[in-house]
Structure formats: C-alpha cells, structure tokens
Image (cartoon, helix red, strand yellow):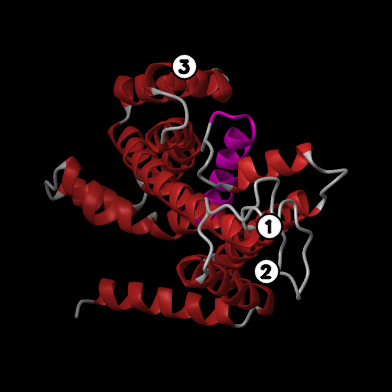
C-alpha cells in the first residue's frame, strides 16, 4: 500500500471517528436509517396500498383503535401508507438528482479550473447564464416539452439547475489546488491533463464533494416537494410529500391531520439530513483536526 492511499484511508477513518463523536449527527443518522427502513418495509407489509380505497372510513381522523392509525383522506386512502410512499419517492428522486447534479458539476468545475484560459472563461460564463434563468421557468418548459408529472421531467429539471452551484464550488477549489507543488510537479513530468484531473484533482476534492452532496439532498427533496405542491411534479394517484401537503392544505380546517402527517415527515426528513450534513462538514474540516 502506498503512502497516499494510507493517508487517504487514515483521513476518512479519522473523519468517521469525529462524526461518531457528534451526538446530533449520530442521532440524525439513526433516525434517517429508521425512517428509510420504515418507508421501504412498512408499505408492503400493510394491508392497504397507496391507492386503496376504504369506503367505510372516509376522512377518518387518527386513532389507535381505528383501522388507519394516522387517518385517511377524503377518498379513504390510508394516510400513513401514502406518506411513506411519498418519503420513498422523494428520497429516490432527490438521491438520483443529487448524484446527477453533483457528477455534472464536479466534472464541469474541475475541468474548467484545470484547463484555464478561454475555455475556462466560456464554461463559467455558461454557468452564469443558466444561473440567471429562473428555475421555475426551466421546469415549466421541460414539463411542456416532455410532459407534466413524469419522473423523468423531475430528474431532468432538478439536475439541470442543481449542478450549477457544485460547478462553482469545485471550480474555486480546483483553482487553489492547481497552484500546489504536486500539480506543478505532475505537469513537469509530462502527466496529461486528464491524468492530473483523475489522479490528483478529483481525489483532493472528495471531502468537499461528499459534504456538499449530503447538503444537496435536502435541497432536492424540498425542490421536488415544491414542484409537486404546485402540480408540476408527481401527479395523483401517486404520492409524494409535496402533493400530499398540497392536498392537506386544502382540507386544513376540516381535516388537519391530512396536512400535519406529511408535513411532520418532511420536517423530520429534512432535519435529519441537515444535521448529518453539518456533522460531515465538521468531521471533514481540516481545521477541526
């Protein structure tokens, strides 16, 4: 094992130790794992599907003695099952969109910062142009072209705007790294640009990218929920946290549980992800060692 690999493994092991020492991050990780397992395992085990109608319990309030512990909506659909399906779908969309946006932003920002010159100027001006466009305008255009309610529309729309901040952050980090001695030594020995990018730039950006990716997931969940709330995202009868909250907001006075249940799950999910992201940021911060 070479020294670089050993140092890299020691860095991640030390970061894991410091992350485990933070109670808030540890509790957030446990809650997030429990919530994810619940969303994956509970709906198949339930006698109710996300679109099953129970005509005997229309708009049933929550109760431990009722057939539906968290209540039902106006069509008699189990709110707990639909909320867990919404958590599952929101997590899936946000994780895929985060992976796509972080991947694009990492490659774009690192390449622009390493190449420099007019290529860098053109690539970053393109990022600035996309930044100037309103996100909702892009989503409406994509919904018109591809079709409203498609999961592909959500992924494309979220990823299309999500990589811009990543590209800027990675670009700034790359500009600092390219002035380091080991990059200049690699250039002097004839290592091509692609080799420098893969062997030296990207590994040194791993900590920053991991932290930002963790903090991006809750942003993507909130963005997906916002689009579904506006009717541009997941459509009925499928359930997402956004359209459940939208439906609950319309029944807030007569059936407040229809709003409170999905909103509570959304707040819990976002809170866990943000606490975990903050813990990772502190654990990977070299100034905290």
Alpha carbon distance from label 2 to label 1 = 10 Å
Q: Which residue is mark 3?
A: 141
Q: Do the residues bearing badges 2 and 3 touch, measured as CB atoms within 8 Å? A: no
Q: Residues within 10 Å of mark 3 (few under 14, many from 20)?
A: some
In the picture, the quarter occupied by the C terminus is bottom right
Up the image or down, 151 lies above or below 201; here it is: above
Secondary structure, mark 3, is: helix
Residue picked out by circle 2: 67
Q: CA distance from mark 3 to mark 1?
A: 42 Å
Q: Position of residue 64 (x, y in %)?
A: 76, 75
Which mark's residue is nearer the viewer, 3 or 1?
Answer: 1
Q: Classify the position of the N terminus by image quarter.
A: bottom left
**Total numbered labels:** 3
Q: Is residue 286 left or right of residue 248?
A: left
Q: Please tell me which of labels 2 and 3 falls first in the chain.
A: 2
Secondary-structure class at tag 2 = loop
**Residue on which the image places disc 1:** 56
Give coordinates of residue 4: x percent, y percent: 27, 71
């Amino acid at each position: 094992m070479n020294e670089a690999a050993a140092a890299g493994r020691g860095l991640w092991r030390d970061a894991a130790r410091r992350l485990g020492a933070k109670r808030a991050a540890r509790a957030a990780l446990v809650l997030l794992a429990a919530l994810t397992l619940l969303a994956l395992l509970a709906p198949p085990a339930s006698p109710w599907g996300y679109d099953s109608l129970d005509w005997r319990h229309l708009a049933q309030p929550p109760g431990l003695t009722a057939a539906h512990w968290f209540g039902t909506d106006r069509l008699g659909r189990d709110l707990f099952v639909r909320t867990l399906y919404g958590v599952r779908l929101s997590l899936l969309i946000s994780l895929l969109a985060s992976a796509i946006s972080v991947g694009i932003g990492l490659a774009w920002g690192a390449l622009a910062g390493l190449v420099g010159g007019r290529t860098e100027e053109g690539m970053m001006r393109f990022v600035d142009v996309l930044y100037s466009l309103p996100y909702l305008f892009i989503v409406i255009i994509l919904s018109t072209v591809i079709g409203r309610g498609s999961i592909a529309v959500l992924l494309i729309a979220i990823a299309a705007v999500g990589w811009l901040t990543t590209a800027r952050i990675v670009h700034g980090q790359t500009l600092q790294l390219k002035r380091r001695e080991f990059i200049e030594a690699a250039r002097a020995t004839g290592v091509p640009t692609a080799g420098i990018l893969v062997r030296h730039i990207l590994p040194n950006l791993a900590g920053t990218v991991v932290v930002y990716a963790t903090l991006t997931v809750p942003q993507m969940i909130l963005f997906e929920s916002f689009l579904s709330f506006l009717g541009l995202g997941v459509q009925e009868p499928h359930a997402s946290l956004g359209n459940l909250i939208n439906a609950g907001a319309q029944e807030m006075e007569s059936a407040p549980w229809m709003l409170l249940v999905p909103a509570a799950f959304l707040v819990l999910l976002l809170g866990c992800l943000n606490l975990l992201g903050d813990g990772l940021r502190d654990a990977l911060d070299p100034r905290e060692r």
